[in-house]
Amino acid sequence: MAELAEQNVILESGRLIFRKITPGDFDDLAGMLRDPDVMAAWEHTFSDGQIHEWIDNQISRYQKDAVGYFAAIRKDTGEFAGQMGLMWNYIGELRVLELGYMLKRKFWGMGFAAEGAAALTNYAFTTMGVNKMYAALRPENPASIRVAIRNGMTAEGSYIKQYNGKAMEHIIYSKERQRPVC
């Protein structure tokens, strides 16, 4: 277990290890954040400077909140499959713990996003003690919506998020922690 701690591992699922993102992940992140298909819901790709800022933002989140996007590493090959995580964000005026996931295109359709979403949601409920999880997803992103639904999340409304100078609609999905029946 000491070896995992040295790698900044946060948790594991059946096929994935989730660890903190580091500056050494630049090339893998660039492979996703520059891919127009991966970034379609964001409506832009990232420059080198924006990728460095992204990494710095995750490191700041770890220090402030102990969560953020994590590198999702395949256990069988050691490949960087994508990034998935938990972020404290605002949906309107409400501060919520939000689930996020993004995979390299070559790992789409393999169940990694659903597996990671379930593991991270369980972590939020059991380790962090939150009572409700959220995902704010673009209606133009049916694959991410399917992952949220597969994770037991249901749509509860929508809101407009200002991002990159644009008003972007997001559907709010959520899942409440199940309480044991006594």
Image (cartoon, rainbow, N blue to C red):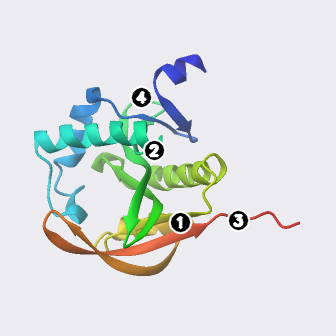
Q: CA distance from mark 4 to mark 1?
A: 26 Å
Q: CA distance from mark 2 to mark 4?
A: 27 Å
Query: Which of the 4 image quarters holds residue 180?
Result: bottom right
Q: Counting residues from the N terminus, which is met first, the one under dot 3 or under dot 1?
A: 1
- Mark 2 or 4: in front is 2
Q: CA distance from mark 2 to mark 3?
A: 24 Å
Pointers 3 and 4 in contact (C-beta within 8 Å): no
For this rendering, which residue is in front, 30 or 62? 62
- Work out whether residue 86 can be spotted: yes
Q: Counting residues from the N terminus, which is met first, the one under dot 2 or under dot 3?
A: 2
Q: Mark 4 is on which residue type?
A: Gly
Q: What number is the disc on residue 178?
A: 3
Q: Counting residues from the N terminus, which is met first, the one under dot 3 or under dot 4?
A: 4
Q: Counting residues from the N terminus, which is met first, the one under dot 1 or under dot 2?
A: 2
Query: Which of the 4 image quarters holds residue 171?
Result: bottom left
Residue picked out by circle 1: 150
- Judged from the image, the secondary structure of the residue bearing numbered disc 1 is helix
Residue 47 placed where, x, y %?
10, 45
**Direction from residue 74 to residue 32 in the image, left or right:** left
Residue picked out by circle 4: 78
Q: Counting residues from the N terminus, which is met first, the one under dot 2 or under dot 4?
A: 2
Residue picked out by circle 2: 65
- Judged from the image, the secondary structure of the residue bearing numbered disc 4 is loop
